[in-house]
Amino acid sequence: MGSPDLPNTPARLVVDVDTGIDDALALLYLLASPDADIAAVLCTAGNVPVDQVTANTLAVLEMCGRSDIEVAVGAQVPLVAPLMTTEDTHGPLGVGYAELPPASRAPSARSAAEAWVELTRTHPGELTGLVTGPMTNLALAIRMDPDLPRRLRRLVIMGGCFNHPGNTTPTSEWNVAVDPEAAREVFDAFSGLPDSQRPIVCPLDVTETIEMHAVHVARIAEAAESLPAEVLSPDDPRGLRSRASNMVVRHLSDSLRFYMEFHRDQNLGFLAHVHDPFAAAVALGTIQYTTKPATVDVELEGRLTRGTTIADWAGMWGREPNADIVTGTRPEAFFEHFVARVGAFARNLKLPFSNN
Ligand code: BDR
Ligand code: CA
């Protein structure tokens, strides 16, 4: 296993999300991370409509005591395609069975695309972008300011699948399938950059090995000193709610139960693929993984293949690589790290109106 492509130093991040159960987990992990400095969280339509994404994002930040972090509203719809959302995967409100207390503040006055442009102008070369939803906001920002890719220290994308089946169509991954035109514009815009600025792409090939099981939830609860023991079982009645004393554990458990039930309905077992937290750990440089450079393009025309990401690994197109694709990691090392961080954060969080 090689070294991470990103150094293990405090990272200043712009995070673009479609919160979403695993986006919420990624945010929780970043908020639990002393080596993450979040400049802004930008919202895009995807798993649920953008207003719900924004409400979820604000609620997660407020629950974690971080109402100081800017949240900006982004695209209501993809660049060209009609919006599709996936409440069957993420629940009617996007956070499974969790009922997050609504946030008491409004989002930022500027749009997500404006925030991408302005933040990278204010901090050129400093910011790591992390996109865990469709790439609509970033594509709009690059249309406004084509130099934007050069001003990012690095971009990490959760999206695509290469030598692996899709999760939306037989060959396409959700974040790309929702807005294939945006994904294509982003990959094009990052072509011709120095190797050190190539986007790091976390595809389903690897993120579907990041299987969260009931035991991981139990360990987080234990580390958080939450009572009673948090035992999620496939034999539980569907939709059973957590009684955890710790509020973070309760919401995490209620949202993950929904996600695990969804995966079980897909014959994948009582587990959850937590794609976005893995991408967040890549952005922080806190885990080991391997990458391989390739030229990535997105199919827009195919009758059956629209939204498919294609990697030219061998340079057959005669175009320089525009992505470093993550090809492997050690999932158990990721979960050891994730459980310890999130558990300790939940234990130490001083929540208003709770016994934590
Ligand atoms: C991606 O799709 C979304 O449903 C998840 O939040 C993740 O970002 C996985 O394909
Ligand atoms: Ca997502």
Image: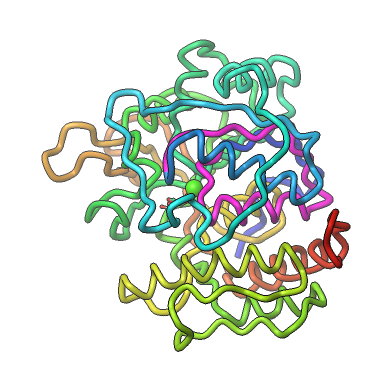
The chosen color scheme is rainbow
Q: Residue at x 53, y 55 (%)?
A: 95
Q: Is residue 255 magenta?
A: no
Residue 260 seen in the figure: yes
Q: Position of residue 198 (x, y in %)?
A: 54, 35
Q: Residue at x 55, y 58 (%)?
A: 290
In the visual, does 230 lie left or right of 169? right
Residue 312 seen in the figure: no
Depth order, front residue of 147/99: 99
Q: Position of residue 159 (x, y in %)?
A: 43, 46
The quarter of the picture where the N terminus appears is bottom right
Q: Which residues are magenta?
A: 17-46
Q: Is residue 20 magenta?
A: yes
Q: Is residue 22 above or below residue 294?
A: below
Q: Residue furthest left?
A: 303
In the visual, does 18 lie left or right of 219? left
Q: Position of residue 87 (x, y in %)?
A: 38, 52
In the visual, does 266 lie left or right of 283? left
Q: Residue furthest front?
A: 353
